[in-house]
Amino acid sequence: MINQQKYPSILLENVVEEFSKLPGIGKKTALRFALYLLKNELIESENLGNAILKFRTEVNHCQICHNVCDDTVCEICNSNKRDNSIVCVVENVADVMAIENTQQFKGLYHVLGGVISPMNGVSPTDLEIASLVSRVAGGGIKEVILALSPDMEGDTTCLYIYKKLAQFNIDISTIARGVSVGDSLEYADEITLGRSIVNRVKYSYEL
């Protein structure tokens, strides 16, 4: 049996425990973070703590697309250089950033805040699907791109949204399957993701 890590300080242990709660951060990496902060100037820890607290308490979500922003409406929705007739539906903010990095998409976004997952207790009402339907119903949108990760939960969410939007006279497309089945958009390389957006195909039940 592997012995549990012992810490010389309860305070150090508490910091390691908090860091290790972050996605992808194990106890060893968390310990390196904590020791790094300990050996450097106090101002670095203060800056980190203040930045996290300010972010958590002051960041907003765009009233239109639900992306994170500093104001009530994000820069993308406010831009007069974007195509307002095309809306790309994504799971989370990281997906917006990933697609923007490809520099291949000039439309707008709609962040769902997750995907339908009965196993995890996530239903359609927990997501920003109703607000998407309202955006489309408001007019001016000609195409909705379903850019969700190509896995079971992503496909289930795409089908649900498709049925909700089928009543409107718009094109509904999905990203080309250059992104491997089961992969997350967030971790797809920029070239593959960019091509998937450019070469999007009409959504159908068979996809």
Image (cartoon, rainbow, N blue to C red):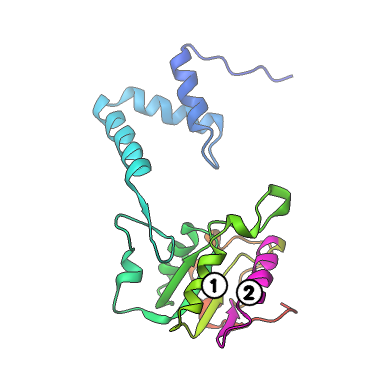
Against 78, residue 67 (above or below) is above
Q: Amino acid at mark 2?
A: Lys
* Image location of residue 133, percent across then percent down: 54, 72
Q: Are marks 2 and 1 in contact (CB under 8 Å)?
A: yes
* Image location of residue 112, percent across then percent down: 53, 61
Q: Earlier in the sequence, mark 2 or mark 1?
A: 1
Residue 26 seen anywhere in this rendered image of the structure: yes
**Label 2, label 1: how far apart the Cα atoms are:** 7 Å
Residue at image x 61%, y 84%?
201
Q: Dot 2: within a 10 Å radius of its alpha carbon, few (fewer than 14), some, or many (20 or more) residues?
A: some
* Image location of residue 104, percent across then percent down: 43, 77
Examine the image and state in which quarter residue 169 appears. Answer: bottom right
Residue at image x 56%, y 34%?
26
Q: Is residue 57 left or right of residue 42?
A: right
* Image location of residue 56, percent across then percent down: 38, 42
Specify the quadrant that holds the C terminus.
Answer: bottom right
Residues rendered magenta in the picture:
153-174
To which residue does mark 1 refer?
133
Asked if residue 72 lies in the magenta stretch, the reply is no
Examine the image and state in which quarter residue 158 appears. Answer: bottom right
Q: Residue furthest bottom?
A: 169
Q: Is residue 79 left or right of residue 172?
A: left
Q: Amino acid at mark 1?
A: Val
